């Protein structure tokens, strides 16, 4: 069972176009910020966090999902940029002293260490707000903008709820561990990944059936992502991850390896990977990139 | 020059219907939260802050602006609820220890004192996200939802920028005090008040000309609100305001009374009040409530 975490595999190893897309998403956000009247120190703080080296998984999912249903890459750009802004907001706030209290993120000081807590709170806030502003101003027609915002805002709120379930748990006392864990994962991680592919589908004018395929794929990789993340916390080094590891057990957090052991967790990854493949079947060849991305996510080491 | 701060005047003194509207906005938000799958402790935290006694100025402005251009009150309800959620988010985050570090808000412990910092950060986050979710799901047609979100998100980000200008100033060294102060006020306070009346106008299907009148009114009362707030910080008691007062001078903050004295600040209130009245002139009798509200805002003592 060495399929998981057996090699260094950035997204761009398996899809060279993703490198270009990732850069274009970064440039799009920087350009949006620069044409927007904002305090210079706030823009600097946002850029410090947003431009930190990252996998750009969510925007790449948006663009690949758009492509998988026959859409032009350009049609998904605003949504791709917006979902990465929401992801970035969540990381900034999660790192705060009152939350996970992390000093390191993607190998660099977290934003509140680089600037200060007040700026980190406000930069996170404005990243979330700016994601919705950007979609409402740049996505056409307006009805599509509203649909994209519906997906993005729902997933954002689910993610925040997931963070509460995870860090400030208030579950009914009779709930078993696995049910609690799934509630955490579905909200905290899976919601935004699911929204990524659905937003991409909407931008590519997916049919109802196509959107259903993408949703199934998004839900499977969404759960898979967090199982892999839990595994990496146990098995990877801080250097490899660019952030503190081995934290979950110390904090008594519910995790897959903690509940079912490392081997069963790895099996769970493979089960979810298979589900993701199956969900894509009806989309045919255009979904090949999404399939590859899922395979990368199953074996990622960062 | 005793026109300002000379009597206790809640909004409902001058517009009894506003009391009913305020309650309906509260009920709308509570009902939205209850049908939404969320952790119970997060909902409790949000409700603790949202249901604290408040003036509900922004939602009342939305509904009155909608009415002023011939719209039905119901058409503005979602937007009214959404803008109060954004206002509530901003207060929760502004009160945090790393920000204004306030223990008291509306006469009760601030949310981070009532619960904890992590919950206050997350409850603020979800209030902002939920405002956009609610509009995207409940406002019809979708194109109107996108227009409302454009107004609300732009004002939200301007408000966050204003908080940065105010608390983490990074102005060019050659800017004079009054220019800095106006930059702070236009963003921090006026943007959301301006958006309130514009959102109400959009919900009431205002013409371009009507929207222009409402915008002029919104900009005038937006600035006026903050001048009155600065005056209240100097002249009002903690008991009267339900929060700490006399804080600005101690923190070396730029304020109207600090820059131009109390009497000139009071004159400024009257100037802005007159501008607001003039902006409404073309809307005729249906705008009477907005005029009354402006007059209340000029003399409010809370």
Image (cartoon, coloured by chain):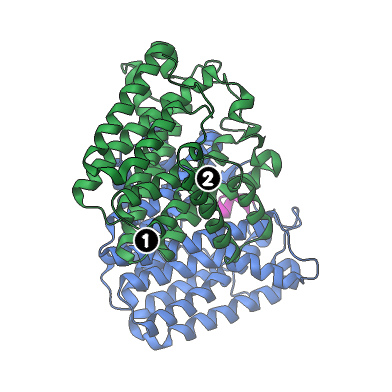
Chain colours: A green, B blue
Q: Which quadrant holds the C terminus of chain B?
A: bottom right
Residue A89 tag number: 2
- Residue with the mark numbered 1: B80
Outermost residue to the right: B174
The structure residue drawn at horizontal position 68% and vertical position 68%, both measured from the top left corner, is: B181
Relative to residue A2, is residue B31 drawn left or right? left
Along the line of sight, the residue nearer the viewer: B231 or B72:
B72
> Mark 1 packing: few (<14 Cα in 10 Å), some, or many (20+)?
many
Camera-near label (2 vs 1) is 2
Residue B151 position within the rendered picture, expressed as x and y whole percent measured from the top left: 43, 66
Residue A292 in view of the camera: yes
Relative to residue B263, is residue A18 drawn left or right? left
Residue A90 position within the rendered picture, expressed as x and y whole percent measured from the top left: 51, 41
Residue A185 position within the rendered picture, expressed as x and y whole percent measured from the top left: 39, 29
Is B119 located above or below residue B87 in the figure? Answer: above
Relative to residue B250, is residue B39 drawn left or right? left
Q: Quadrant of residue B110?
A: top right
Q: How many marks?
A: 2
Q: Quadrant of residue B22?
A: bottom left
The structure residue drawn at horizontal position 47% and vertical position 84%, both measured from the top left corner, is: B279
Q: Secondary structure at mark 1?
A: helix
Residue B132 position within the rendered picture, expressed as x and y whole percent measured from the top left: 39, 54
Measured in 3D between alpha carbons, the distance from the residue under mark 2 to the one under mark 1, in whole angstroms, is 26 Å
The structure residue drawn at horizontal position 38% and vertical position 34%, both measured from the top left corner, is: A294
Q: Are marks 2 and 1 on the same chain?
A: no
Q: Residue under mark 2: which chain is it in?
A: A
- Does the segment drawn in magenta span residue B238? yes
Residue segment shown in magenta: B237-244
Is A20 located above or below residue B191 in the figure? Answer: above
């Amino acid at each position: 069972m060495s399929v998981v975490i057996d090699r260094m595999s950035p997204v761009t190893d398996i899809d060279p176009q993703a490198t270009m897309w990732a850069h274009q998403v970064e440039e799009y956000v920087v350009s949006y910020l620069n044409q927007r009247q904002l305090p210079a120190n706030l823009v600097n703080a946002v850029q410090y966090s947003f431009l930190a080296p990252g996998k750009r998984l969510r925007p790449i999912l948006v663009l690949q999902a758009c492509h998988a249903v026959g859409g032009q890459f350009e049609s998904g750009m605003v949504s791709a940029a917006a979902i990465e802004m929401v992801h970035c907001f969540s990381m900034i706030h999660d790192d705060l002293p009152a939350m996970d209290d992390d000093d390191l993120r993607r190998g660099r000081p977290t934003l509140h260490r680089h600037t200060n807590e007040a700026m980190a709170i406000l930069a996170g806030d404005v990243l979330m707000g700016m994601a919705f502003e950007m979609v409402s101003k740049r996505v056409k027609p307006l009805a599509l903008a509203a649909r994209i915002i519906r997906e993005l805002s729902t997933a954002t709120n689910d993610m925040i709820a997931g963070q509460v379930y995870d860090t400030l748990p208030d579950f009914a006392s009779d709930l078993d561990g696995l049910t609690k864990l799934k509630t955490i994962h579905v909200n905290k991680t899976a919601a935004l990944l699911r929204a990524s592919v659905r937003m991409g589908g909407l931008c590519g004018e997916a049919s109802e059936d196509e959107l259903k395929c993408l949703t199934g794929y998004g839900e499977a990789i969404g759960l898979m992502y967090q199982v892999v993340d839990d595994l990496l916390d146990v098995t990877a080094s801080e250097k490899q991850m660019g952030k503190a590891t081995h934290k979950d057990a110390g904090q008594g957090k519910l995790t897959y390896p903690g509940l079912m052991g490392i081997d069963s967790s790895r099996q769970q990854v493979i089960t979810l990977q298979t589900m993701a493949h199956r969900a894509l079947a009806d989309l045919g060849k255009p979904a090949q990139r999404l399939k590859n991305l899922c395979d990368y996510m199953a074996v990622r080491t960062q």
